[in-house]
Amino acid sequence: MTARKTIPFSRVRRVAVIAGHAFTQLVRMKVFYFLGFFAVIGIASNFFNLPQQSGPEALGDNGMDLLRLIKSWSLGPMTLFSVVMGIVSTALLLPKDVEDRTLYTILAKPVPRLDYLAGKLLGVLLLLFVSLALMDLLMVIMLQMRLSIVLEVQASLGQSRGWDAAAIESLKQDTLAQGPTWALQGAVAAVFIRSAIMAAIALLISTFSSSTLFTTVVSFLIYFIGHFQADARDFYFEGGEAGTSAASRYVAMSVSLVFPDFQLFNVIDAVIQGKTMELIQFVKLTLAGIYYVAVYTIASWFVFSDKEF
Amino acid sequence: MKAATGKGPVASQAPQPDFSASSLAIGRRRADTAGVPAVEIRHLVKDFKTSLKRQPLRAVDDVSITIEAGEVYGLIGPNGSGKSTTMKALLGLVVPTSGTCSIFGKDSLKVDSREDVGFLPENPYFYKHLTGAETLEFYGKLCGLRGAVLKDRVSELLALVDLEGARDRRIAGYSKGMLQRIGLAQALVQEPRLVILDEPTAGVDPLGSRQIRDLILKLRDRGITVFLCSHLLEQVQEVCDQVGIIFKGKIVKSGRLQDLIAIEDQTEIILKDAPLELVAEIEALVKRSGSAEWLRSGKPRTTLERLFLRETSGDES
Amino acid sequence: MKAYRKHVILALGLLAAGGLRMSWEAPLTREFRSDGLLAKPVETATREKIGQTSAAVALGGLRTLVATFLNLKAFSHFEAREWSELAETYDLIVDLAPNTPYYWTTGGWHLAYNSASDYLTRTDLPALRRREAWRDSIRRGRAFFERGTRLNPDEPSIQAELGALLSNSNKLLDFPAAAAAYKAAADTGKAFPYVRRGECLALARIPGRELEALDLARRLYADPHNRLPTLCCVRFALESHADPSKDPLKLAISIFGDPRSAHDQLGEYWVRVQERYPLDGVASALKILESILLVPADESVFKRALQPKETPDDWFRGR
């Protein structure tokens, strides 16, 4: 009988140790800094009022379009950064450990393989979360600054054109809906969830393959195909034109079953337009994300559990 | 005058680190597991698939090894003979095609068998951005240690492997010998009863090698079982109690070291400051006995290693 | 073969998980689509038009970003007067971002106004071809606006632009459609006030619907903000049309407030022949007002040159 006490939540602690470690390892990498730098530049470029064209771009009337522009120019880089970082970081974690043989030292300790995988994935998710949170803050600050300018100009223009209070108020409400709302935070969260799913997929692929490059390329392919998944599903259920073979419909069905559906996350586009997402809908989206991540993590564990080194 | 009996040479004069025996009291646990072998490998077979068409490669072919608690066992063999594969099977990194491995009675394929074992892989790399102390803390936390207990253990281990001076230096700045020693320290972080070392002195200079060898002996004194493999045969000879020779996946010879290497029918006598007449007298005595044969006399040679150490450490060997 | 078996189990497992997922994923997608949170999937033809890689990116949720870049590209087509490329680009843009009114209004503007005007002045084409190109541009602009209104029924700005195009006498007039467009825009409740007035003005020019127009005009007149010159004049004409026996002077004063304003506004209204506003009772009112205000004969409104009453077709003759 050893003299060691069993510590409560020892598994959780272990996973946390691995996650924290993966986080510090990734944060030091140059690829992270470059990607992050460019994403931040992309968002900060909104600070300079990029004129779309020299046409009717009076600030007052088209202020809402300007806000939309800021949002799309921020969420775009955020999406790009999070997907790329999510895939690439996860893809390199396992091969790096195998190559450096540090994997042996870890697995030679009483560390269950699931804890190891979960820890690595959580480290990547933590990285994504922190980065996106910082970018979100930047976006909200800029949006708020623009919003107050736009509201001022609208108010003064409205006054000078003799609008009544109701018209001014309704325009103000519409403009506020384009600003930093909770729905916008929901959109950023959706960006995070999508990249989390991609990280889980990259984890699964990396348990098969020992090459970072292979994992990265295949993960990006899955990302692309995932956007057609909904179309494949529709194709299966509604059938194609007459003459579509059963075989192609079954292929479509398999595609839609195996690949994740990223079209769900196009709600981000809607939020950029200024639509609101209800809380319940956001919760459903989050649960969908959790389902995906769990399925892919369990699949990774299944492959990894008796992988030989 | 001293009769050489084939035991290890006199302990080196390298500085002796100070440690408290109470904290690494492995010996106490020894009593609890009396009778259960530290390592039991039974009829281990491991095939690797090379390509789809050809026959699978049999890396390990019906290997059986038993190591009692408290022993130092050396597995020696040429490159590609299956040493590493056997170790990995013992650690659960590789699934046997057939046969079983167990550590203190627990099946290697289960995670809890690794509570009692520490592993130092061949040419280890550790995370370069961590310092020595942080590396040990990381591994300690993985084993469930934390807080003050962890900190004390880390300090202890660093003292044991003589790396206190480098505790806050990044691993990236460690020499090969330091890497091996920090590796040994992490293997010991959770007070394992069995330590597995894969080529512990490969690529290390003689001074560092000597330090590692001394550490292994210290571990043995504490009752920790050591399973090492190496192809530096001299060093294996110095530390091991039991030895197995593996070739093309099969154990071709195994047993107690002394039994294996003793040249049964010869005796060695080493004298200091002996005048020539005395030697002549002894020779005559032997010739008179009739049953023994005088083979040779002359000046024994020191080893190059001892000469090196003597010159580089500045001590008298 | 253990590895083979493992792969099969994994594949089956993923398929099973996917099947389970289907039970809530399809309904969730439908719910999001109906709530307007998800745009309809991009039509297949578009996917062929965009290159393979950018299609994936566009469908990858970066639609709005790609639309932004295409908008910049479209502007350079505008500057270079490459109208068909411009039209194609805008078709792509609205496929990617169908719910951004700005793209619809700008695209339609380019087609119906800029493109059309450009064809007016091109000397390298014979007149008949220019006319056809001009008409074609306007028709395409109209179709573009109409498509936009179909995809964004709640968005007033596109409808209002459509109404403005259809009631523009320099373009192809279609007052009934214009009135309907203005009405749809105003009915969303989010339109600017001029839209409702536009509806009234369009209705007024549809033969047979003067009573409707009058009704609306009266309602609009009730709000002092709406008492702009054109509306007041139109109301005047509609009142006269509805009841010719009304006294022009009394009517004028009740609408405009005083003879001078009445005279000035009706005078301006009188010369705007090209816009085809109803003119019932305007002439007799002006005569009375001029005599009251003692306007000298040579400064009379009736001596002023009227707007040329020509249709756009006339522009293309003899040029």
Image (cartoon, coloured by chain):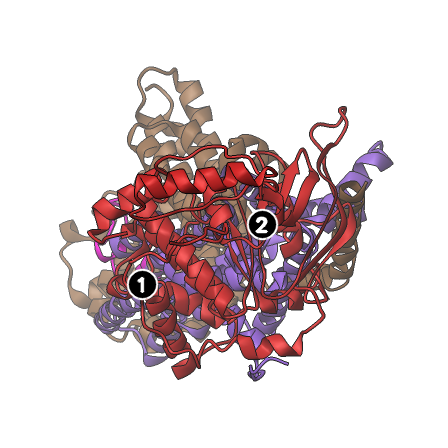
Chain colours: A purple, B red, C brown
Q: Position of residue C7 (x, y in %)?
A: 75, 44
Residue at point 40%, 58% (across, down): B214
The local crowd at label 1, few if under 14, some if 14 to 19, many if 20 or more residues have their Cα within 10 Å, is many
Please tell me in which quadrant of the rendered image residue C157 appears: bottom left
Q: Amino acid at mark 1?
A: Asp
Q: Is residue C47 above or below residue A226?
A: above
The residue lying toward the viewer, choosing from B3 and C141, is B3
Question: Callout 2: helix, strand or loop?
Answer: helix
On the image, which quarter does residue B251 sit in?
top right
Residue C49 part of the magenta segment:
no
Q: In front: mark 2 or mark 1?
A: 2
Say left or right for A238 vs C309: right
Query: Quarter-wise, where is residue B193 in the image?
Result: bottom right
* Position above or below: C187 against C143: below
The circle on residue B162 is 1
For marks 2 and 1 on the same chain, the one whose residue lies earlier in the sequence: 1
Q: Which mark is residue C22?
A: none
Looking at the rendered structure, the secondary structure element under dot 1 is loop
Q: Nearer the viewer, residue A37 or C259?
A: A37
Q: Is residue A215 visible?
A: yes
Asked whether residue A65 is drawn in magenta, I would say yes
Image quadrant for the N terminus of chain B?
A: bottom left
- Which region shows up in magenta? A46-66
Question: Seen in the image, is C48 located left or right of residue A35?
Answer: right
